[in-house]
Each structure stands twice: as C-alpha cells, then as structure tokens.
Amino acid sequence: MLSNNHKYLAHVVAKGIKDVFEPVIKWFKTLITNVHYLVALVAKEENRKHTMEYVHHAVKVGLVSKDFEVAQNACKFFQKLAYEYFSQDLLSYAWEWFVSEQGGLQYCLLCIKRHPEIADHAIGVIIEFSRYNLMELFTHHLKRFHHDTKEFLTTIRSLLKPLTESPLTKEEVNFIRIN
C-alpha cells in the first residue's frame, strides 16, 4: 500500500474500498489511539524530517476524503499528532512540512472547502501546527494558497474566531490584530 508513492493507499483513503469507508475509519481511529507510539518511532529516526514527511504524505489524503467521517478522523489524527510533536519538541520539523507545497495547510484548506461542516476540526489542525507561527501563517503562507483576494479574506475571517477562542493562540492572534 505504501509503494508507488502511496498511490494505492491514497486511493483507498480518498474513495474507500468500493465506496465502503468503515475500514479506513477504523484505521484512522487506530492511528489516533497509537499516535504517541508513532511519534516515539519518529523521534528515534536519524532523519526525522524525512520520516515525518513520509508519514504525513501517506495519510494527508484523509483530509480530503469523499467521506465526511474519514476527513473528520484525519483531522483528529493530525491534531493529536501535532500535539504529540509539540510535547516531544518536534513541532518545528512538522511546521516545515505543514506550510510546504502539498503540505498540511493546503490539505486543511481543501478539507474546509469539501466538508464545511467539519471546518472546526480542520482549523484545530491549523492551530496545533501553527503554534508560535501565526504571524508567519497569516502574512505569508495563507496568501500562497489563495490567488483571489476575496477568497483569502474569507479564509482569514473564518479562522479568526476559532483562533481567538483557542487558549493556545488567543494572545498571538490578538497581538496580530492590534499591530
């Protein structure tokens, strides 16, 4: 499933197995339950950044799955993964992937478009990965994924309320808004 650049796994996660998503949902729930083991393995790797990217690219397609519940569980997985990275002092490596082309930010924004009913979960992923980097997120990275100014401003508007309500980001967002 991981050969050929994750294409078969990506297909199964995005479209299910003959449009059946229960195995994919169970897989994500297993990943969520065992995320601390995954992070422990990543932390032991010599090339952590490469290992993280490999893991992230293998599962990021869950954020844009046709199935609402798969996308929701993918958000929960990435949110918990970012939290574990933070607690293991690995978040800076993950941040680089998150804001890269075809990285987590782009997939979270696509998730919000495809499944607006779980936007709060996708925004939770953005909050966890963007810890201490909100100024950079708003001034540089979000602009790259929006070619239209109106769409860019709509995205910022949708992010501001959850970001000001989160204890993790409240101070930084209020600082950005004041300056």
Image (spheres, rainbow, N blue to C red):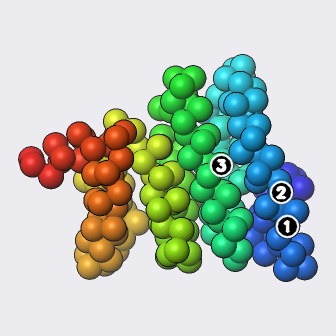
Picture mark count? 3
Which amino acid type is marked by label 3? Answer: Phe
Which amino acid type is marked by label 2? Answer: Lys
Which amino acid type is marked by label 1? Answer: Glu
Residue 158, above or below 138: below
Name the side, left or right, on which 107 lies relative to 156.
right
Q: Determine if residue 157 is in view.
A: yes
Percent coordinates x, y for residue 157 in the rendering: 27, 68
Q: Residues within 10 Å of mark 2 (few under 14, many from 20)?
A: few
> Which label is found at residue 112?
none
Residue 48, above or below 99: above
Percent coordinates x, y for residue 122 in the rendering: 51, 60
Q: Residues within 10 Å of mark 3 (few under 14, many from 20)?
A: many
Q: Are marks 1 and 2 in contact (CB under 8 Å)?
A: yes
Q: Residues within 10 Å of mark 1 (few under 14, many from 20)?
A: some
Percent coordinates x, y for residue 120 in the rendering: 47, 62
Q: Quadrant of residue 103?
A: bottom right
Separation of residues labelled 3 and 2 (CA atoms):
12 Å
Separation of residues labelled 1 and 2 (CA atoms):
6 Å
The residue identified by callout 1 is: 22
Quadrant that contains the N terminus: bottom right
Name the side, left or right, on which 148 lies relative to 90.
left
> Which label is found at residue 77?
3
The residue identified by callout 2 is: 26
Residue at position x 67%, y 23% from top? 43
